[in-house]
Image: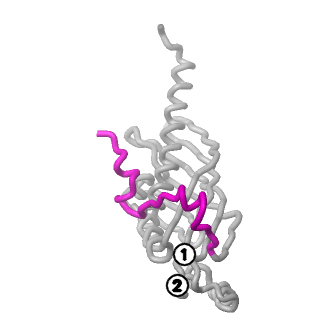
Amino acid sequence: MEMNEQTLKRLLAVADRQEIENVLGTYCRALDRLDVDLLKSVYHADGFDDHGSMKLNAHEFAKQVIEKLRGLCVYGMHTVTQTVIDVKGDTATSEAYYIGLHTVAADEQAIGTFFGQAYLNEQRHAGNLGKRHEYVCGGRYLDLLQKRDGIWRIFRRKMTNEFAICRPERGCSEGVPAAFFTGSSRDRHDPVYALALG
């Protein structure tokens, strides 16, 4: 059965979209596993990331953001929700909504560095400095991607941060939450790295 040109174009567009979605997911994995090499792999070497206060060459951004997360947070989880991807040849745009969770150590210096002096003073007054603190945020990754040598990578990224919640951590370590808790590792010892198909 011969495939007409329109069907072939649609199939190629679906394949491109899937590859771009994989780039977006790999970005989240790299952040949460503190894997700087994996994070660099989602960007072109001449790429650029505008992350608010961090506006850098993408590979330098990868190095600095992993250092910050490693130094201040004891846990992190990022997820991409819905995406709108528009592919035109070897260039694409993507609007991907995200939610991020960052858990900061129960350490006065880490809390002050991450959240700022006013928050630190408020939490000291409330007696909450012996607890870990959470930063939950959400917004969008606005990306320009390019396909070079058959591989999609981010060329330009602009992050928006449209809501944020800062609070002392409050969890439950009994009952169903405790029964189903399975930890992760913030490095290449995480079980996901054992999934590689050889």
Q: Is residue 89 left or right of residue 124?
A: left
The one nearer the camera, 42 or 46, is 42
- Mark number for residue 104? 1
Q: Is residue 167 left or right of residue 44?
A: right
SS type, badge 1: strand
**In the rendered image, which quarter contains the C terminus?**
top left
Q: Are marks 2 and 1 in contact (CB under 8 Å)?
A: yes
* Location of residue 41 with respect to 112 vertically, above or below: above
- Residue at screen point 61% across, 53% down: 142
Residue 174: % across, % down: 59, 65
The one nearer the camera, 175 or 89, is 175
Highlighted range, magenta = 169-198
* Location of residue 70 with respect to 45 vertically, above or below: below
User: Furthest residue to the front?
Assistant: 175
Identify the residue position indicated by label 2 in the image: 107
* Location of residue 102 with respect to 45 vertically, above or below: below
Residue 134 included in the magenta stretch of the image: no
The one nearer the camera, 193 or 154, is 193
